[in-house]
Image: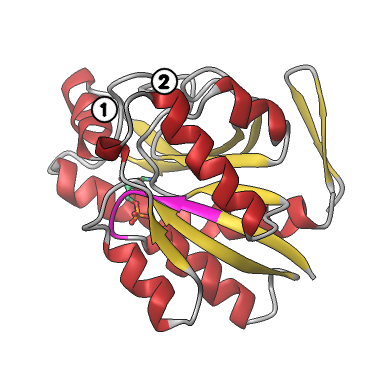
Amino acid sequence: MKGIGVLISGGGTNLQAIMDAIDQGRIPARINVVISDRPDAYGLVRAEKRGIPAFCINRKQYADSYAFNRAILEKLKEYKAEYVVLAGYLSILSPELVECYRNRIINIHPSLIPAFCGMGFYGHKVHQAVLDYGARLTGATVHFVDEGADTGPIIFQKSVEVMPDDTAETLSQRVLKVEHEILPRAVALLVQDKIKVSGRKVIIEE
Ligand code: GRF
């Protein structure tokens, strides 16, 4: 059974969506380890409730990003993670970690990349930027992680209409629902090796 490592920073609703999809037989793999970069991430509680080894590797306890990412990489290997899913994860991965898991790390971002993404675009900041700009469509994107911020080849996208009375909160709730739909689908294909990458193009064998 293929093993997945999930990295989180917050509430873990995307982690929950993956756990639920595994329980419902929609993802032929198991989560071997959950790692949070901050101690107060409720996603750690979600993992523990489901009996999944869960650890906080606290960014603040490491001298630099390299040492921090090295600790994460060692934990992923210790728990035999063959794939890595960034599920609401906010720290930058080191080039070493990205290289080690080339085309085996995916991320969920709450906008239609390349819009409203990159450094500083996370959580409600993304949705507020969409509203401030007056965009009529937003959505969610699952993509491979490379050395950049939200720049890897795109796997799935799904759009969400922006309503006239939307706030960052109301918009985030509708986008989150779409995240919970497309991320498990991408994980299921990833662990079955059904996603091929050719340059920026992603070919899916559904
Ligand atoms: C949300 O903003 C989500 O859009 C993004 O990370 C944040 C927390 O997600 N992917 P989660 O509930 O921790 O999965």
Q: Quadrant of residue 166?
A: top left
Local packing at callout 2 (Cα closer than 10 Å; few below 14, some 14-19, many 20+) is few
Q: Residue at x 43, y 72 (%)?
A: 47
* Tally of numbered discs: 2
Q: Judge the density around disc 1: few (<14), some (14-19), many (≥20) Cα neighbours within 10 Å.
A: many
Residue kind at label 2, given as amino acid type: Ala
Q: Which residue is denoted by mark 2 in the rendering? A: 115
Name the residue at 21% across, 58% down.
40
Task: Check disc 1 and report its element: helix, strand or loop.
Answer: helix
**What residue range appears in magenta?**
6-11
**x, y (%) of residue 184?**
59, 60
Residue at image coords 53%, 59%: 181
Name the spot of residue 182 as percent of width and height, x first. Answer: 56, 53
Q: Is residue 154 left or right of residue 123?
A: right
SS of the residue under disc 2: loop
- Nearest the camera: 153 or 32? 32
Q: Is residue 23 magenta?
A: no
Quarter of the image containing the N terminus? bottom right
Tell me where residue 126 sits by quadrant: top left
Q: Is residue 16 above or below residue 186?
A: below
The residue beneath circle 1 is 130
- Location of residue 69 with respect to 23 vertically, above or below: above
